[in-house]
Image: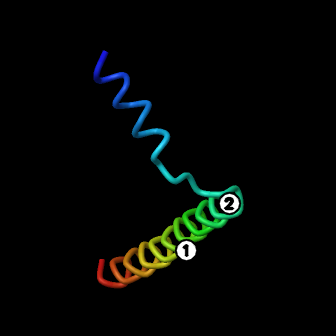
Amino acid sequence: MKFIKSVFKTMKDTTWPTKREAVSDTATVISTAVMFAVFFAIVDFLVQWAVSLIA
């Protein structure tokens, strides 16, 4: 029972982000993931191109 009470107390003490902060953070994560995907796709294309020149 102590554990459950502790969980509820911790949940009440937790500062939750506002809707605006959550949306902003989500947009940042998605845009960063897209930028990394594009970067690695370009690097992959360049490496394939370089290997095809050698082979």
Which of pointers 1 and 2 lies earlier in the amino acid sequence?
Answer: 2
Label 1: state its secondary structure.
helix
**The one of 25 and 45 positioned closer to us in this rendering:** 25
Q: Quadrant of residue 47?
A: bottom left
User: Can you give x and y, in whole percent of width and height, for residue 11 in the image?
Assistant: 46, 39
Left or right of residue 43: residue 23: right
On the image, numbered disc 1 is attached to which residue? 35
User: Can you give x and y, in whole percent of width and height, for residue 43 in the image?
Assistant: 42, 78
Residue type indicated by callout 1: Met
Taking the spot 40% from the left edge, 40% from the top edge, the residue there is: 10
Other residues around mark 2 within 10 Å, as few (<14) / some (14–19) / many (≥20): few
Q: Residue furthest top?
A: 1
Whether 34 is drawn above or below 7: the answer is below
**The one of 24 and 43 positioned closer to us in this rendering:** 24
Taking the spot 64% from the left edge, 65% from the top edge, the residue there is: 27
Measured Cα–Cα span from mark 1 to mark 2: 18 Å
Q: Which mark is drawn over residue 16?
A: none
Residue type indicated by callout 2: Val
Taking the spot 64% from the left edge, 64% from the top edge, the residue there is: 21
Q: Which mark is drawn over residue 23?
A: 2
Whether 25 is drawn above or below 13: the answer is below
Left or right of residue 8: residue 54: left
Left or right of residue 1: residue 29: right
The quarter of the rendered structure image containing the N terminus is top left
**The one of 17 and 8 positioned closer to us in this rendering:** 8
Q: Quadrant of residue 28?
A: bottom right
Whether 53 is drawn above or below 9: the answer is below
User: Can you give x and y, in whole percent of width and height, for residue 53 in the image?
Assistant: 37, 84
